[in-house]
Amino acid sequence: MNLSVLARAVFFFITLYFYLSIPLSVPAFAQVSALTGVEIVKKSRALLYQIDDQKSTVTLWLIERDGAMKRIVVSRYWKNYRSEEGIDSKMLLVTEFPTDSRGVAFLVWDYDNPDEPDDLRLYLPALDMVRRISGQDLNDAFLGSDLTFADMGQRRLDEDRHRLSKQEVYRKTDTYVVESVPKEKESIYSKKISWISQKDWTLLRVDYYDQGQKLLKRQTLEWQLVKGLRVWKRTIVTNIQNGHRTVFDVSGLQVNIGLRDKDFTAESLKSGLDR
């Protein structure tokens, strides 16, 4: 497997979980219609870090137009630092499949300071070597998937202009439909449109538009209940323009299991975690 692609793959999983946990209870302000687009996005993101830590298995399916599939499996460990010492969260990803990539691991320290880039490191067991990964090439696709590494990263609220465009029923759920336009000129998207539940703030769908204002791809999300939390279970991303699909399945999810600081170090990057 191409090591440069593997190195950048960590960005995909960083945010594959950026909508991780949503409380089951309904906020009192959920039905307020006077909210602005930025307020809706902010309230949704405020619920992302309700748990202390989590462990799960992520299975990635790459599906061609003709139905041919490829599978990638990783173990994921995540710990919430709530901006303590400037760190938002830490994450460890350990590749389980395919066999020729088993043991390849990624360590991510996500900093709260927007001026400080995330610290990403890659471990290659065949070389017994740890390499620091830069944040470049964020617009590249992850292993042929339909999301870029930038898609899966947690964008700061002020990086986009958010506008509440309408309210509508989607999948039998009352939703806010928010249009987000990136401020940076180099973005590959002209805008993103998000469907956010008015009941529990879960993100249900995201449409991505290319620079020609044409619909490029659509992401839909499904949820599950774990310890009273509504947590992400599956997302499907379809490239509308070429028919390729990517499915991400989460299994074996455990929350608040007491992950430690030493579980997110260079040593754990090499050895992985046995939990």
Image (spheres, rainbow, N blue to C red):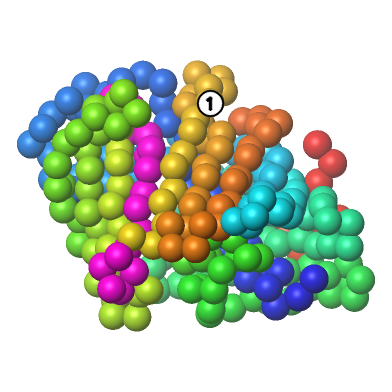
Q: Tell me where the magenta segment starts and ends, as one range.
A: 199-214
Give x and y (percent) for residue 238.
49, 52
Q: Which residue is mark 1?
A: 224
Is residue 213 a member of the stretch shown in magenta? Answer: yes
Please tell me which residue is depicted at 20% across the width and 33% down the height of the picture: 168
Q: Amino acid at mark 1?
A: Gln
Is residue 208 a member of the stretch shown in magenta? Answer: yes
Query: Within the image, what quadrant is residue 198 found in?
Result: top left
Q: Secondary structure at mark 1?
A: strand
**From the viewer's perspective, is residue 232 above or below residue 42?**
above
Q: Is residue 113 visible?
A: yes
Please tell me which residue is depicted at 53% across the width and 78% down the height of the picture: 137
Q: Nearer the viewer, residue 66 or 253?
A: 66
Query: Within the image, what quadrant is residue 109 found in?
Result: bottom right
Q: Is residue 223 left or right of residue 30?
A: right
Give x and y (percent) for residue 156.
34, 60
Q: Dot 1: few (<14), some (14–19), or many (≥20) neighbours within 10 Å?
A: some
Give x and y (percent) for residue 249.
63, 40
Q: Is residue 39 left or right of residue 200?
A: left
Give x and y (percent) for residue 235.
52, 42
**From the viewer's perspective, is residue 11 above or below residue 202?**
below
**From the viewer's perspective, is residue 230 above or below residue 151?**
above
Q: Is residue 108 visible?
A: no
